[in-house]
Amino acid sequence: MTIEVELAGIGKRFPGVIANHDVSLRIRPGTVHALIGENGAGKSTLMKILYGVQPADEGTISVDGQHRSFASPTDAIEVGIGMVFQHFMLADNLTVLENIVLGAEKLHGIGDGARTRIKEISARFGFGLEPDQLVERLGVADRQRVEILKVLYRGAELIILDEPTAVLVPQEVDALFSNLRELVADGCSVLFISHKLDEVLAIADDITVMRRGTTVGTADPRTATKHQLAELMVGSELPSPETSERTVTDQVVLALDGVTVTDDLGRDRLTDVSLAVHRGEVVGIAGVEGNGQTELVEVVMGMLRAASGRITLDGQDITRLSTRKVRELGVGFVPEDRHRHGLVLDFPLWENRILGHQTKPPVVKGPLLNPAGARTDARRIVEEFDVRTPGIGTTARALSGGNQQKFIVGREMSGDPILLIASHPTRGVDVGAQAAIWDHVRAARREGLGVLLVSADLDELIGLSDRIEVVLRGRLTGTFDPSQVTAQDLGAAMTGGSAA
Amino acid sequence: MKRIAYSLAPPVVAVVFALAATCVVIAISGGSVGAFLSTIFSVPNDRILVNIVNQSSLLAISGFAAAIGFRMGLFNIGVEGQYIVGSCAAAFFGGSGLVPGPLNILATLVVAILAGAAYASIAGVLKVTRGVSEVISAIMLNYIALTMSGYLVQRYGVKAGYTYATNDLPPSSQPLGFAILPGANDVWALTVIAVAVAAGYWFLLARTRFGFDLRTTGASASAALASGIGVKKMVVVSMALSGGVAGLVWMPAYFGSVHRFGVPENFQAGLGFAGLAVALLGRNRVPGIILGAVLFAYLSGQSNELQRDGIAKQVVDITQGIVVLAVVVAYEIVRRRQSRAEREQVSEELAATPAAANEGEAR
Amino acid sequence: MRRLAATTVALATCGLVLSACGTAADDDKAADKVECKPTKIEGDPKVALAYDVGGRGDQSFNDSAYAGLEKAKGEFKVESTEGEANQDEDEAAREERLRGFAEDGYNTIVGVGFAYSESVNKVAPDYPNVAFAVVDGFDPDKTVNCNVAYLTFAENEGSYLVGAAAALTSKTGKIGFVGGVNNALIQKFEAGYEAGAKAADPDVEVTSTYIEQSDPKGFGDPAGGKSAAEGLYSDGADVVFHAAGGSGAGVFDAAVEAKKWAIGVDSDQFKTASAKQRTRILTSMLKRVDVATYDFIKSVVDGKPSSSYTTFALKDDGVGYSTSGNFLSKDTIAKINEYKDSIISGDTKVPEKP
């Protein structure tokens, strides 16, 4: 049981966005092939294409040299491709056996035939699963094994694992890896998606790196270093964002003092964070996604409450203020997810100009809206920020990602804010728009704007920031001078590889 | 031009489709399709016309009450219970004659609004504090409203025939209707409430900050939160607002002809549910809701005529149901088409520069 | 409860048909004093039945009225039509239904159900040559309409008889009553039932419950009827009388499950119930809407349409009890018939309020 899968020239566009273009990838039989890349690099889209969840717009998939097209996951499973999603799809109130045979009753029935087969697979790869156990009694690692067993049961020879280690603790990761090695020894192939470089180097036989929707290179895990991989992942594309002159003043605009944020379960998401942003300063926050950046932004914006600590804006305590009050005090906010937080997609642009500025002229007059003012100012943004749109009456949904983002940045820099909080301001934005946004941030900084910049794009961080703070597991763990630091150093600090 | 076509096509198509489907039902059940069509399209007599106008006003107010919820992303199925509570409270107050003369009208309307709003707030508060779906709690509250008002009327009302009702509205507080067509009933004076609610609804949503916050929350709760809207507060406030308008639903009939409240003889139940359908039909837009209300009232008004043609009264219900269903489908189709057309227009504007990849944004 | 007619509508109506309004008197007993000439009906009777919600096919009230019409059609030359109320319709819709009939030339219009009382009261003055009747109806104001007959029933008398039957059959000494909606009409059933039971056995314990306080749904809610009856049975009652329309089916189901007795209402429900339920229907309190409807049509045929209140009592065979199923013992039947005679003779007065 071995199959060889090859992807060539895969392209996929969504309205306004190109998610994949010219992606090529070959998975040798009996190997673990790692696919790495930053969040948003196009990995998930590619996997969904390979698994038949969505069709590719261009390019070919071939299995054992034959061209294939998958209309649905059923087609993919038929040729031996199975996928385990990051979020498990198990019915808690059913047993392991029932979960596995669900939808595959024809293979070995639902009785003893199936039970025997499950025991057989479980024993062969050291899964240690009991067919009649209730899934709700199982821990995360066992559930993951059930998912893997599910695809093996269906005859998968290539198993796609989407960030399988994200939910596991280190010991469980080791156990997973030994399972995977058994699988490979048996002739299966694994496509392992991750952005954790240590793990990739530990398990992979081949590595392919994706960036900005395309495959940018391959690496050999025996010779490659984490630094090299980080460099490939993050890239260094022109135009590089370089801050020409220093405009940092000594006036503190935003200060966090010992801020801690806890989640519903009482776990720390942000621990004892202290940070200051000065007028005319861009402070960059570097970190692997999920290490507390989102919480940092939301606690400043008043969307989350700090469990302890104090936040001040221009000397005023804003720790307990509502988002609206914080915005009224002159904070612009470019949220990380523009569709969910930055725009109302079904509103026309001029109404989106009002969003987040409901209490500030020129878009309102007292308790009333000022449509004329909003339209005029929306037009100004469209012009100044080069938003490509037929008009300001066009709904936000119709615009491309880059143009949506330019509009948001333009809006958030309206009304002379004293602080701009920007999360991934150029994610998913084309090169031209990216340069424009950087220019605008720099210009505002010269005028005395303080900026808190969260980004996964290390080039952006290095090029724009006056100072970079690294966040790891909810703590600020290092401060770097962007003029001295390299992407590799930052990458290492972000993953906890080495301290600054 | 295109915009108008986009917004007009779906209801027209839906009505035509619904009539066609109804004809099929009639034909299958052995009725006369010809009689159905000729009656449906015949001009009703003066009395029925007046009834249609009066009923339209009730349905429209109910439609606006539901639409406020819909625009906020809330399914206020509790309009039914809220207008029962509003009507009951208003009739007790109005019948008590505490406030003399015409001023009583105004005071009673305020009571209706407050009672409806207070009752709706229960569902709103439960939603934000306990996460109870407003649909579930409102359905329960609808039952409670009906039973409670029945109890109150029996306990504190006076006997009216076999049942009980509130005291009659003092004659000095009964406004004169509009005698538009001779020989027919008057058009109720307080049908003007429907006009006022329509104007207020438009102004609130299109012109005020509060309305903007409400629409934003309805369209994207996450964007609302990031923009500084207190979403929980908005839920309670907009539920109360929806309930306040719901409290007014039956007021034109109360002041216009019934003058007292008592379930079932001296009340018209079911307007709240009909209002939800009217709001769906009218796509929460002012002209749409008004037309939807008129259409529903028209179909109901013709129901008696249809029965005399030997067509079951249920046929009207079928038609109403199909219209709503068809219009929802039709609007969705048009919405998709419109949004695609708009995207195409945008991409024409843009030079063919390849946008950067972004899977997170992919939808 | 005088309904204040202060709207211009009502005033205008009065102005147009002065003759009808002019007879208004302030005395509560006005109805007795006004001299009504019989309504002149031209040509053969053309009968229109305006049903309440549910319409023909309800196996109860509306069907019974239809049976009366059928009987009349069999005997006289009568044309007829029917119309049915919509759920949640308003007063104007009912009025329009009646006016529609009148304008289509129907000269004998029967509103089936007291819900038509108000609308008939409002419409009748405009059609002085049409004979109206309202089953279970009442005159909501003091203005007498000479062309309206209110066909009411001595439900308390019929209920008295089945109450006696219940008390005589009960072994536990506990019996129950389930009302559909707690209004004055249904309370009449309750009052008669309790009085009859106490007469037959002074120690009997009667428990009454209502499905709804005011929502007419109480007449069409079998599940509510069932849970109400289950409560009574589990409290020890072994006979339950229902006056709850369609909800009665649930009462019968509860009786089947508890293996105890139930008493039907309006029509002989033994005849329409399922085979299982039949075994538990002790008797039914008969309310002869068919008799009332037929009598009214006949009065029109005879050229003397009845008007004002006509009560159909035991002596008119307007109410009664059924013996289908032969569950009542001979002794019980004999006893019941004694009570019946006593009521007819006037020796026993049956209360109307519990």
Image (cartoon, rainbow, N blue to C red):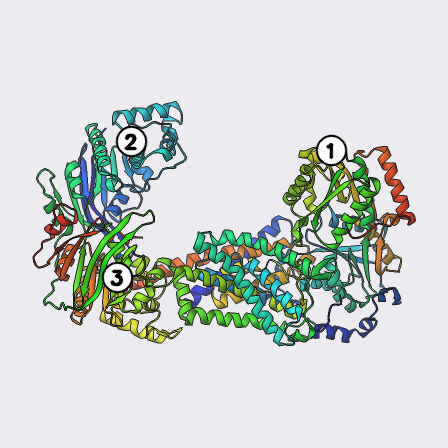
The Cα atoms of the two marked residues, 2 and 1, are separated by 62 Å
* Left or right: A441, with A81 as reference point: left
Whether A362 is drawn above or below A55: the answer is below
Marks 2, 3: nearer the viewer: 3
Q: Secondary structure at mark 1?
A: loop
- Residue under mark 1: which chain is it in? C
The 10 Å Cα crowd at callout 3, few under 14, some 14 to 19, many 20 or more, is many
- The type of residue carrying mark 3 is Ile
For the point 53% across and 66% down, the residue is: B245
* Left or right: B266, with A177 as reference point: right
Whether B261 is drawn above or below B196: the answer is above
Whether A365 is drawn above or below B163: the answer is below
Q: Which residue is mark 2?
A: A152
The 10 Å Cα crowd at callout 2, few under 14, some 14 to 19, many 20 or more, is many
- Residue under mark 2: which chain is it in? A
Marks 2, 1: nearer the viewer: 1
> How many numbered circles are shown?
3
Residue C279, which numbered label?
Answer: 1
Q: Which residue is mark 3?
A: A311
- Residue under mark 3: which chain is it in? A
Q: Would residue A396 be seen by someone viewing this image from the given angle? A: yes
Residue C80 image position (x, y, % from top left): 77, 55
Marks 2 & 3, CB-CB < 8 Å contact = no
- The type of residue carrying mark 2 is Leu
Residue C348 image position (x, y, % from top left): 88, 48
Is the same chain shared between marks 3 and 1?
A: no
Is the same chain shared between marks 2 and 3?
A: yes
